[in-house]
Image (cartoon, rainbow, N blue to C red):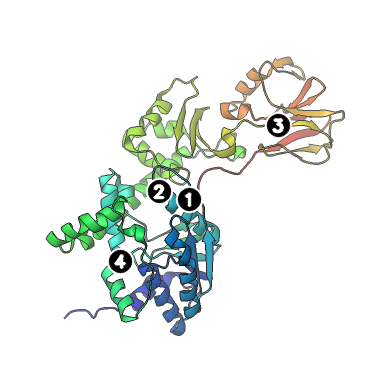
Amino acid sequence: MDQPTIDLPSRLLLNLTPWRNATTWRIAFSGGLDSTVLLHLLANLAKTESLPALRAIHVHHGLQAAADGWPEHCRSICDALGVPLQVVRVQVQSGASLERAAREARYGAFLQATQANELLLTAQHRDDQAETLLFRLLRGAGVRGLSGMPGKRVLGRGHLLRPLLDIPRAELEAYATEHQLSWIEDPSNQDRQFSRNYLRHQVFPVLTERWPQAVATMARSAAHLSEAQGLLDDLAQIDLARARAESDFDWLGVPSLALAPLAVLSAARQRNALSHWLVTLTRLPDSDHWSGWDDLRDAAADARPIWRLAEGELHRTGARIWWLSGGWLRPAPDAGEWRDPSQPLVLPENGVLSFSGQKPGGPLQIRYREGGEFMALQDRGHRDLKRLLNERGVPGFVRGRLPLLYRGGQLLAVANLRGLSGCEREGWHLHWAPLSEDQGLS
């Protein structure tokens, strides 16, 4: 006997059941068919179900004149349904891919809007998943890319959920017609120069004419690949656990891994582990650019190789690899005189300095290493600073940012380094809290 068909509202509610304890369900509302149906479904469910607070967010990209009227349309729909609406205007950066730039701007706005224990709901459906799979297949994506859009993922302090991902577009169209909904038709959706539009209008009609279940089977393949990616992620966690050994420089707050546990793995496991580690920090390189990892891994022990990626750089120094981005890639401006050592000193683009114990007297200056510095050490005489840094294994990338404390022309202390950070006899030490911003992507 056939199982009874579950109606669309019930399936949506079932998909959202694990998230009923969220404080807010925020709907990404473009005003198009898909998000209009999602908003209408949730507003109706809220009349009979105890749901979290519903809110909507509309991102205005300003890319075409027709879009200027969309916020008002969205506001009228939300007012009619009793759902508060936030309109966010974003600036889309120019670049090779307008689609990607608009998506990044949009999700940047979603990230800012989503608070702790909140859920952002987007309206992608099963047809979108199939398009994503084919689009990425044609671009040569691996398992991660071919697993399609995840049904859920972390978004800032909250989560993003796609509760319609198992629903075909035809059902959303039928629901919209039945309830006489009005929605925005984006003119750019007909522009075949955009790859996704070309697939939607030119390729998928041909596929589904020959294979009517093509969309469903492709979405199912994406689910299988997502499961496979989960297993690869589990393997990556095992391999990374060995590489996450503690370092004497964990206080820098810079993501790093020990190289040796990675280097003994097969090439495929190295790429898998590194991809898992890097995916939250930068866009991953395509297969043609993984040679940068080989060069970094195989460089001579005394080399300082760098692998440049989209949002930062991977450095190798001190038998570890280090991820640097943002301020770490810019030279620190001169610091100058420390007029009141009783108060912490904010270093331009380089964190904060402070003293513990009795403050040293005299006019104090903060400088950065230029080369040729010497430091007087008790029982050791004057020692070359470069050799002292080598003895302590200070990573190369931090040496030019390491604050040096001077009195007159004398180097008194090097922040945070054992045996160099102060004077035991006088009872003081120099402490540095490095910059913590711009360390990768959320």
Q: Is residue 52 left or right of 271 when viewed as pictured?
A: right
Q: Pointer 1 and pointer 2: residues touching (CB < 8 Å)?
A: yes
Mark 1 or 4, nearer chain start: 1
Categorize mark 3 by other alpha carbons within 10 Å: few (<14), some (14-19), many (20+).
many
For the residues carrying marks 2 and 4, which lies nearer the camera in this image? 2
Amino acid under label 4? Asp
Looking at the rendered structure, the secondary structure element under dot 3 is: loop
Residue 282, position as x, y percentages in the image: 46, 42
Amino acid under label 1? Val
Q: CA distance from mark 1 to mark 3?
A: 42 Å
Q: CA distance from mark 4 to mark 3?
A: 56 Å
Amino acid under label 3? Ala
Q: Considering depth in this image, is 51 or 90 the residue closer to the camera?
A: 90
For the residues carrying marks 1 and 3, which lies nearer the camera in this image? 1
Q: Residue 92 bears which disc, if any?
A: 1
Looking at the rendered structure, the secondary structure element under dot 4 is: loop
For the residues carrying marks 3 and 2, which lies nearer the camera in this image? 2
Amino acid under label 2? Leu
Q: CA distance from mark 1 to mark 4?
A: 30 Å
For the residues carrying marks 4 and 3, which lies nearer the camera in this image? 4
Q: Quadrant of the N terminus?
A: bottom left
Q: Quadrant of residue 410?
A: top right
Q: Residue at x 42, y 34 (%)?
A: 261
Q: Is residue 340 visible?
A: yes
Mark 3 or 2, nearer chain start: 2
Residue 303, position as x, y percentages in the image: 48, 21
Q: Residue 166 bears which disc, if any?
A: 4
Q: CA distance from mark 1 to mark 2?
A: 8 Å
Residue 364, position as x, y percentages in the image: 82, 29
Mark 1 or 2, nearer chain start: 1
- The residue singled out by tag 3 in the image is 415
